[in-house]
Image: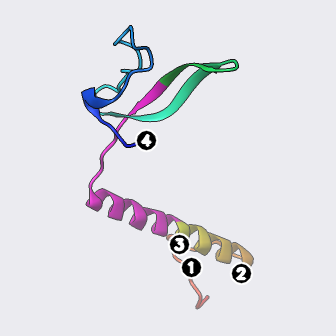
Amino acid sequence: MRGCSGNNCPTGDQYDPVHNKQRCPPGSVVTGAVTHSGDWLDSIEYVCSPIHLISAETIRQRSIDDAQREAEEAAALLGALAGGAPTGGVLNLLG
C-alpha cells in the first residue's frame, strides 16, 4: 500500500465520509491513541497535545543551568566528605 495524504486517503466507512477524518487542532500533535476493539478494531481516537517550541538559546541556557546545578551538588558532596560545607557554593580545597 502506498502512502496518502489529505483527501486522497481512503475512508474506513465508505458510506460516512466523517469517519477516519480526525485531526489534531492547529498547534498540536498526536501523542497517543485510544482504541476500542474486540475481534476487529472498532474505533481509534487520537490524543493530541500542544506543541511547545523553544529556541536554541533557551536549550543552551537550560543545559548551562543543569551543569551549574550538578557542579554545586558535587561541590556540596565533596565538602561533606571532607568534613565541612563549602563556602559560597564553591569547594575550598586549600582549607
- The kind of residue on which mark 1 rests is Leu
Quadrant of res 4: top left
Residue 44 rendering spot, x and y as whole percentages: 52, 22
Q: Which residues are magenta?
A: 46-69
Q: Pick whichever of labels 1 and 4 is earlier in the sequence.
A: 4
**Residue at the disc numbered 3:** 71
Residue 64 placement: quadrant: bottom left
Residue 26 covered by magenta stretch:
no
| Residue type of the residue flagged with mark 3 | Ala
Secondary structure at numbered mark 2: loop
Q: Nearer the viewer, residue 48 or 21?
A: 21
Callout 2, which amino acid?
Ala
Residue 26 visible somewhere in the drawing: no
Tell me whether the residue at label 2 lies in contact with that at label 3, contact meaning CB atoms closer than 8 angstroms. Answer: no
Q: Nearer the viewer, residue 7 or 61?
A: 7
Query: 10 Å neighbourhood of mark 3: few (<14), some, or many (≥20)?
Result: some
Label placed on residue 1: 4
Kind of element beneath mark 4: loop
Measured in 3D between alpha carbons, the distance from the residue under mark 3 to the one under mark 1, in whole angstroms, is 10 Å
**Spatial separation of the CA atoms under disc 4 and disc 3:** 53 Å
Q: Secondary structure at mark 1?
A: loop
Please state if 67 lies on the left or on the right of 28 as rendered: right
Q: Amino acid at mark 4?
A: Met
Pointer 1 and pointer 2: residues touching (CB < 8 Å)? Answer: yes
Q: Position of residue 7 (x, y in %)?
A: 26, 26
Crowding around mark 2 (Cα neighbors within 10 Å: few <14, some 14 to 19, many 20+) is: few
Name the residue tied to disc 1.
91
Residue 16 occupies quadrant: top left
Residue picked out by circle 2: 82
Residue at left 59%, top 74%?
Answer: 75
Asked if the magenta segment contains residue 60, the reply would be yes
Whether label 2 touches label 4, CB < 8 Å: no
